[in-house]
Amino acid sequence: MHEASLAILIRVQPNKCEQGILDAQGARQEQRESVHGGTRSDQALLITTGAWRLIKATTHILMEGAPAGIDLAEVRSAMTEAAGVERVHDLHIWTLTSGVEALSAHVLLRPDCSARDRSAVLASLKRILHTRFMIEHTTIQIEDGRQENLGVRGW
């Protein structure tokens, strides 16, 4: 009985070899913490901050939010300044994916603009949108003001 108690007591206290291993493991853990930038709570805060930014950006893209850094009024003004354009309406700009924006708009041509000029106006608008605003995905509906009401209500 006395020997069993002595054996338990010996196992609870590590011998010199085991103590050396435990000390080395503790030193390695301290080194790891200093190399990797601090404590686990610091690392958790860093990960949480990065995850929040990612979730926020992803939600903005999925909800087709207007891209940051593109002013809708400035885009409308630039499009209206193009030769042959009288007015721009139903203008929408959204983000497809990170760094890729899309645009859709209706463009009313000036009365003196002929039907032949449509393709030139469209090419001019696409060039303006690409060079000034880096928008490449565009859907532009050209209207000449002479189009008849097709009897469709609610549009």
Image: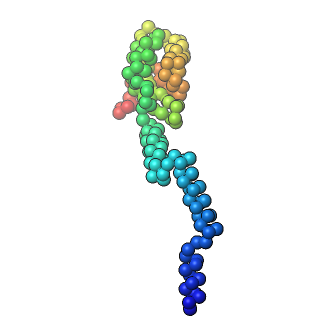
Residue at x 43% of width, y 16% of height: 78
Residue at x 56% of width, y 47% of height: 35
* Coordinates of residue 103 in the picture (x, y in percent): 47, 27
Vertical placement of residue 86 versus 61, above or below: above
Q: Of residues 132 and 136, which is closer to you in this image?
A: 132
Left or right of 146: which side holds 21?
Answer: right
Quarter holding the N terminus is bottom right
Q: Of residues 155 and 99, which is closer to you in this image?
A: 99
- The outermost residue toward the bottom is 1
Left or right of 98: which side holds 154?
Answer: left
* Coordinates of residue 53 in the picture (x, y in percent): 45, 41
* Coordinates of residue 147 in the picture (x, y in percent): 42, 20
Quadrant in which residue 76 is drawn: top left
Vertical placement of residue 27 versus 78, above or below: below
- The outermost residue toward the top is 112
Residue 35 visible: yes
* Coordinates of residue 44 in the picture (x, y in percent): 47, 51
Residue at x 59% of width, y 64% of height: 22
Quarter holding the C terminus is top left
Residue at x 56% of width, y 81% of height: 8
- The outermost residue toward the left is 154
Residue 59 visible: no
Vertical placement of residue 149 versus 124, above or below: below
Vertical placement of residue 95 versus 16, above or below: above
